[in-house]
Structures are given as C-alpha cells and as structure tokens.
Image (cartoon, helix red, strand yellow):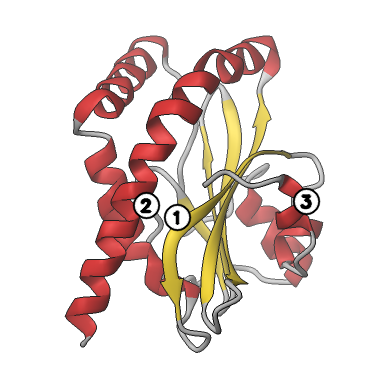
Amino acid sequence: MRVNKEEHLKHAWRVHGLLPDLRIEDVWLLPVEMEPDTSIGELNAAFVKALEDTSSKGVAGWLFRLRFFLGRIFGWEDAAKAKELLPAGSIRARYASEEGLSALNVDYEGFGDFVPVYSFHEEMLSEIENETVLAAAHFGKVPNGLGKQAVQMTIYVKPKGWFGAFYMQLIKPFRLLIVYPFMLRLIGRQWEKYQKQKV
C-alpha cells in the first residue's frame, strides 16, 4: 500500500538529517508483520529474493530487463560501486563523515546494485548510483496498531541533469502501477516463508 510521505517524516529516523538534497519519491507500507524485538535487518534476505524474482518474472521482469539492456548500451551503469570504500559523493561517504568513521562495517549485503549504508534495529539504508540518478532505499519499522510492527519502504532520489529528471518521470507510471505492487506481493510471500523457517 502506498502511503503519504508525511507518514515517513513523522518518525525519528537517522535518515532524515542525512539526505537533505534527495527528494522522497515513494513511500510504501510493506505486507510484512514483525515482532518488536525483530531487527529490520532480518528483512533483507526476503527483499533480495523478491527483487530477484521481480527482475525475472512477468511484465515487471520484462521492464527490468529492458532497463538493464538500455543501461548497458548507453553506459548508465558506469558509475563506480564500491562496497568497502567510501567513494566521493556517495551517501556512504556522507554518513561516515558525519559519524567520524574511516570505514563502514554493515552486517548485511544490500540487494541488487544497492550498497548498504547502515543498519540499526529500527531502520536500514542502502544506496545506488548510476549515470541517471543517485538514490536510496530506506526501510523503517512502524507500529501497526496490533501490538506488532509493519515496515515502511521509502525511496529517495536525486536525478542527474535534465535526462535523469526526464527518465524518472518516464518510468513513474510503470513503477507505481506494475513494478512496486508486484514486488511488494513477493516481499510478503518471502517474509512468510522466512518466518515459517524460523519456527
């Protein structure tokens, strides 16, 4: 379910002061239910699997493959992606500088081309950068009103130049109507499987 960005902003998360130059593009409530003592990091494995399935199945998979094909042709993926280093301009470098860190040791691997920035009990943040956009995916736990917790997924973006802005507008209807709804259903299924395996 898509939710208003004010629902994201009302929570006291670390991400708010870290990305003042990125805009909130989308906020979604994931079909996930967590116990209060469950770390948000446990969601990563379910999200990785859901993203793999989204990029390989159905109409959403076709759109992902088309995007990757165009990216290879036009060099949109040529920006450096360093997991251990702190490349200049990256969100990882920004976070490390604010925290006085010389390196980041994050206990999860990220997903797809997203690189982890930090992971706390209540929230985690990953980033991706290419020739069209600098973006971040934030996951935060929120009360669901039933004594347990749900998870909000918030996407931040900073398009690069006129083409980046044009590209983000071009893919918006496909993202909102096809990709995210399909991916969120898969996340819910993968999380249920993960919970059953823990029992």
The residue indicated by pointer 1 is 83
Return the disc, 3 or 2, that comes first in the chain's sequence. Answer: 3
Say what amino acid the circle numbered 1 marks.
Lys
Q: Position of residue 42 (x, y in %)?
A: 38, 73
Q: Residue at x 79, y 62 (%)?
A: 10
Which mark lies nearer to you, 1 or 2? Answer: 2
**Vertical comparison of 172 with 35: above or below:** above
Q: CA distance from mark 3 to mark 1?
A: 31 Å
Say what amino acid the circle numbered 2 marks.
Phe
Say what amino acid the circle numbered 3 marks.
Glu
The residue indicated by pointer 3 is 6
Q: SS of the residue at dot 1?
A: loop
The residue indicated by pointer 2 is 111
Q: SS of the residue at dot 3?
A: helix
**Vertical comparison of 152 with 99: above or below:** above
Q: Residue at x 81, y 46 (%)?
A: 20
Q: CA distance from mark 1 to mark 2?
A: 12 Å
Q: Residue at x 29, y 50 (%)?
A: 186
Return the disc, 1 or 2, that comes first in the chain's sequence. Answer: 1
